[in-house]
Structures are given as C-alpha cells and as structure tokens.
Image: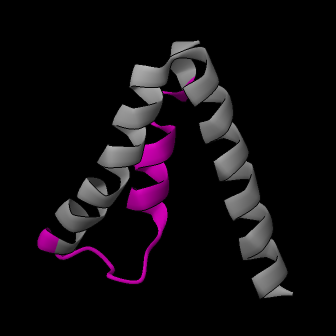
Amino acid sequence: MIDSLDEARRTILVAFSAIRGERDRYTGLHCESLAPIASRWAQALGLSSGSKCPHRGGYLHDIGKY
C-alpha cells in the first residue's frame, strides 16, 4: 500500500513537472537541475537523509509562477 502511494506521488510530481516544462522550457530545466541540489543542501544541513521532500520541493518550487 505504501509503495502504491509513493508511486502515485511520483506520478503526480512528474505530471506537474511536465506541464511546467511545456509552458516554460527554461523553468522546467531549472527545476530539474535544482531538485538534486536541494537534496544535497538538506543532507549538508543534517536534515533527514531519507526525506524526499527537498528533492520534490526542488521540482515544485516554481509551480506557482503560472
């Protein structure tokens, strides 16, 4: 059940990312490159290494631009 929920969240994240990328290619590429950077910053700051939130936040941080 948990795996199904994680897969659904990933699917939604990918869908939002694709929509954003279609509307503004530069922003889409920017968010894709920022996601792993956000994860590394979180790890450097000592936040939970198992958390996917910084990575997901990197993808979604510009979603309100539209």
Instruction: Locate the C terminus and report the quarter of the image it occupies.
Output: top right
Of residues 9 and 26, the one nearer the viewer is: 26
As displayed, is residue 10 above or below residue 66?
below
Is 65 colored magenta in this rendering? no
Residue 2 quadrant? bottom right
Quadrant location of the N terminus in the rendered image: bottom right
Q: Position of residue 19 (x, y in %)?
A: 68, 29
Q: Residue at x 32, y 82 (%)?
A: 49
Q: Is residue 58 above or below residue 16?
A: below
Residue 5, image x and y in percent?
Answer: 80, 73
Q: Would you say residue 56 sits in the magenta stretch?
A: yes
Residue lying at 14% horizontally and 68% vertically, measured from the top left: 45
Q: Residue at x 68, y 62 (%)?
A: 10
| Viewer-nearest residue: 62 or 27 | 27
Residue at 46% of width from left, 62% of height from top? 53
- Residue 39 locus on image (x, y percent): 30, 64
Q: Is residue 42 left or right of residue 15?
A: left
The residue segment tinted magenta is 44-63
How far from the left and from the top, in percent, is residue 22? Answer: 62, 23
Viewed as shown, does residue 24 lie left or right of 16? left
